[in-house]
Amino acid sequence: MGVIDVVQDVVNTVNGYVWGPVMLVLLVGTGVLLTLRLRGLQFRQLSLAFGRLIHSIRTRHGEGEGDIPAFHALCTALSATVGTGNIAGVATAIVLGGPGALFWMWVTALVGMVTKYSEAVLSLKYRTKNPDGTMSGGPMYYIEKGLKMKWLAVLFALFGMIAAFGIGSMTQANSVTLAITSQVSVGGNVDLPVVGSISVLSLVIGIVLVVITALVTFGGIKRIGEVAAVLVPFMAVLYIAGGLLVLALNFSKIPDALALVFTYAFTPYAVAGGAVGYAVSQAVRYGMARGVFSNEAGLGSAPIAYAAAKTKSPVNQGLIAITEVFIDTLIICSITGLVVLTSGLWDDGAYTSTGLTIQAFGNSLGPVGLLVVTISAILFGYSTILGWAYYGEQCFHYLFGDRMKNVYKVVFLAMVLFGSVTRVGLVWDISDTFNGMMAIPNLIALVALSGVVVAETQKYFEERKSGSGEGGTGSPVGTPVS
């Protein structure tokens, strides 16, 4: 056994724990705890959350101190959250866990909404104003300033920076490349030219991705926010509209699909003939795992974007953050899941992952369905690159300051190109490990600082009730760097 094989085995073992049942229980359990402490805020104030979202759209330039409007911050967070997991992840969950997996994805979303709320509130409360006037925030700041645990904050930033090179650059670039090359080779029925072991088309796609990513990311969070505010609504509407059209054409099959979801969330599913089936534990495991991977609630990534928002109150942005999980999982992932289930293709073993979703759309819409999923996969992947470029940069900034931030950006772009032309499973598995490890420091902080979230929330609604503004500003929303 070679060194690579040994490292792969170690990484697989670590991933078994990082993304295993214990971590999923901790992620969902933290959401349950926060739901109890905040008395079901995500349900009681859902209409207000969408009200704040609509208000943020109308308030184009934002309100209060910060770098980007509140809506741009939401779109930046969504750009990283809405990715290939919404297309491939949902299909994979159903293939591996059965129809009941979709139910458990919904469970992660219901508790994940309040987790995202809490992350955003803490991120705004403890964010820091840099010497150049920009804001920095996220778990590393509320761990250091709220928990007074600098070492734990450093660990989070380190995990986040490493994860960005994999989950935020290479994997997404590879997904975009595969979405294009697979359709060219299949649709055009041609062999793609190769130089050495590298596809020329893949190299061209990689170079284009590097260029358009550099044009955005070197403009900082303001340009990322501006692009995300255009890109995210467009790609979300495109995919949702396509999915709803498929469901409209298969409307008579929706009740049976929903029956499968609720029935097999709690009872085993046996395929005809009894050769293969799904245990309830599989539905729970894969549903929760793919749900968390999709909406990232508890991982600590999105609050880095929310810290840049121009807002009068941490709670205002926290309420908007609730809508992020709602849109990502309860809308987009649900549409994917129902399209897959109504297609009848999910249990025949012929299709998995993205291929299953593409075929499910194609069965109803033909070439149009194929085009919708392909374009969505490209945009979802590219938008995730933009969001994670900022997350990684902020983690790097926390660890090393501004001295070499352009060096980080160049390395990130190199990873985008590398991911476009090759497939390195070990590197991806390692990045997945660090992505999951980000959750450990973040969950510790969320539980330990839950009282702070409760206090900020109570203050906001007391001031709202008394009519003294929009809930107040809470604690300083940007303290100078010492």
Image: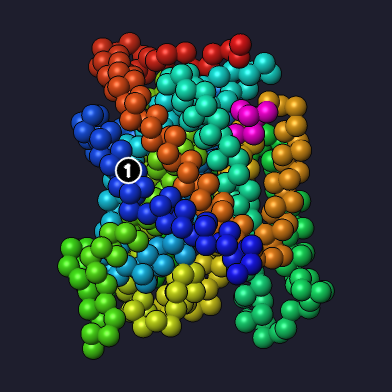
Is 399 in the magenta? yes
Task: Identify the image's colour scheme: rainbow, by chain, secondary structure or one colour.
Answer: rainbow
Write down the region rendered in magenta.
395-400
Is disc 1 placed on a helix, strand or loop? helix
Image quarter hosting the C terminus: top right
Residue 346, percent from left and from top: 36, 76
Q: How many marks?
A: 1
Q: Residue at x 62, y 82 (%)?
A: 186
Position of residue 179 measured from the top left corner of the image (x, y, whole percent)? 60, 68
Residue at the spot 43% in from the left edge and 83% down from the top edge: 350
Amino acid type, residue under disc 1 in the picture: Leu
Q: Is residue 132 magenta?
A: no
388 in relation to 16, above or below: above
Instruction: Report x, y in % for residue 131.
Output: 67, 16
Residue that extends furthest to the front in the rendered view of this protein: 1
User: Residue 450 versus residue 333: which sits nearer the camera?
Assistant: 450
